[in-house]
Image (cartoon, helix red, strand yellow):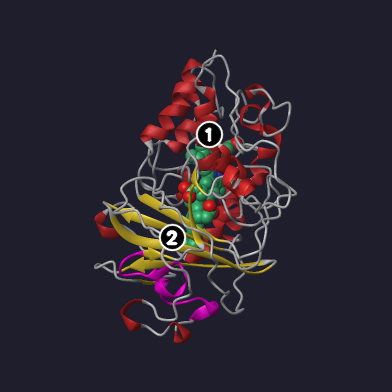
Amino acid sequence: MRNFRSSAVSWPRARLARAFASWVAVLGAVGVAGAAACTSDDPAPAVVPDGGSPEGSVGAEGGSSSSGGGGLDCNEDLGAGGLQQHLSCTGLYTDIKTKAVADGARPFKPAIPFWTDGAGKGRWIHLPPGQKIDTSDMDEWKMPVGTKVWKEFQIDGKRTETRYYVKTSPTLWKKTTYRWNAGETDAERLDVGEKNVNGSTFEIPPTDRCDSCHLGQSDRLLGFEAVNLALPGAEGLTLAKLVAENLLTAPPARTTITIPEDATGKGAAALGYLHSNCASCHSSAPTAPQNYVGLDVKLSAKALLSDTPPKLSELPTYTTTVGKPMTVFAGGPPTRITSGDPDQSGVVFLAARRTSDELGQMPPLGSHTVDTVGLQKVRDWIAASP
Ligand code: HEC
Ligand code: HEC
């Protein structure tokens, strides 16, 4: 076995410079169009958190609140970039004190959530009434203008952060994040990020880093996508519900997806994990930040929903990893995946370490604690592979 340093990376200098250039260049454009209208009359089922949520929020009477928490006047709340300064003014809640969520904000949960150091999560989407999602490309959904999405994070059951994307024109998404106050009565905009939130390893990313992951889909949404809404485990507004409610321009014939399995019986779980945790950067999608690396672990809904879905060994996750050399990372195992040997697999090596240098760990940002349970699925598959 090769001997590598555990906390430093041996990136050749030129390589590092190039990586950082492309790496930091993905900051999304920020515009200044006005905030979109914010309610509809869809019924809102109970919220579907990943776990650790304080309580399930339920739909309240519809209607946009023009006053936020603590008697705030939302008409005066717009700040930099035309985004609200307070979460209570974004249209998610009709009453932030009781956590009553607006009817038009529909909870959803991707089947395989992204690991964020064990934080609990809740997610909601508001689709402008009467509009459909353009699903003519099942792998690159286009959301209607006026779409709003929120993702709440809880640490030890306490709301700490709610991230927000809003589509204000066919080509522009605005984004920010809101930091909850200690009493959880409202959350205020925080664009510069925060480390070690509440004494944990959890990090609130600065808003100029959101698109480092969210450009993985040309229309930004990473969990609200066909694969994660069609796999077992998806909750709330699933692919089946979207079709039933006639919200897609090109509804698929089937609304459930099964990831192909191989003889190990452990492949599907591993591939699902890599799709949700790594494919935002590592796919061949034109906007995917690291598409130049040639590592493609994205599952294609188009392929998996087709009449003749591919075999596991035909999927890019397999063909771009198993027996394939590491091309940009030096100092770890020489191969991305070495069948039968997780410890000689670069994918596992990078996902199993946390370093002060972003490029010494995977994912490079958004996590300072290894997802040992999730990663075990990848280890088990590789170990069982002949
Ligand atoms: C390290 C990668 C990463 C970073 C950085 C990141 N996100 Fe995400 N985000 C994801 C992934 C992956 C999902 C989907 C999976 C999930 O929700 O568990 C997601 C989901 C979301 C959602 C729910 C809608 C959707 O895409 O499915 C919102 C809203 C969101 N993020 C906002 C933000 C904002 C705002 C920022 C910056 C402050 C940000 N995110 C930074 C990876 C990231
Ligand atoms: C936020 C974007 C992002 C996410 C998410 C991400 N990576 Fe990466 N990955 C990178 C960057 C940046 C590089 C270095 C690229 C360069 O040097 O130009 C990289 C490189 C790699 C390499 C080296 C490939 C080679 O051929 O040398 C592997 C393996 C890898 N990542 C695995 C993963 C795994 C496994 C995950 C999920 C647990 C993951 N990555 C998630 C951005 C990401």
Name the quadrant containing residue 386.
Answer: top right
- Label 2 lies in ligand 1 vicinity (Cβ under 8 Å): yes
Name the quadrant containing residue 377.
Answer: top left
In the rendered image of this protein, does residue 279 appear above or below residue 38? above
Looking at the rendered structure, the secondary structure element under dot 2 is loop
**Which residue was labeled with disc 2?**
205
Q: Is residue 88 left or right of residue 240?
A: left
The image position of residue 98, as x and y in percent, is: 31, 66
Looking at the rendered structure, the secondary structure element under dot 1 is helix
Taking the magenta stretch, the answer to whether it contains residue 83 is: yes
Using the rendered image of the protein, determine whether residue 3 is visible from the camera's viewpoint.
no
Residue 276 or residue 64, whichever sits in front:
64
- In three-dimensional space, the C-alpha distance between marks 2 and 1, rounded to whole angstroms, equals 25 Å
Q: Residue at x 56, y 14 (%)?
A: 263
In the rendered image of this protein, does residue 375 appear above or below residue 277? above
Residues rendered magenta in the picture: 79-99
- Label 1 lies in ligand 1 vicinity (Cβ under 8 Å): no
Label 2 close to label 1 by CB (< 8 Å): no
Amino acid type assigned to the residue bearing label 2 in the image? Pro
The image position of residue 170, as x and y in percent, is: 70, 66
**Which residue was labeled with disc 1?**
272
Q: Quadrant of the N terminus?
A: top left
Amino acid type assigned to the residue bearing label 1 in the image? Gly
The image position of residue 101, as x and y in percent, is: 41, 64
In the rendered image of this protein, does residue 341 appear above or below residue 37? above
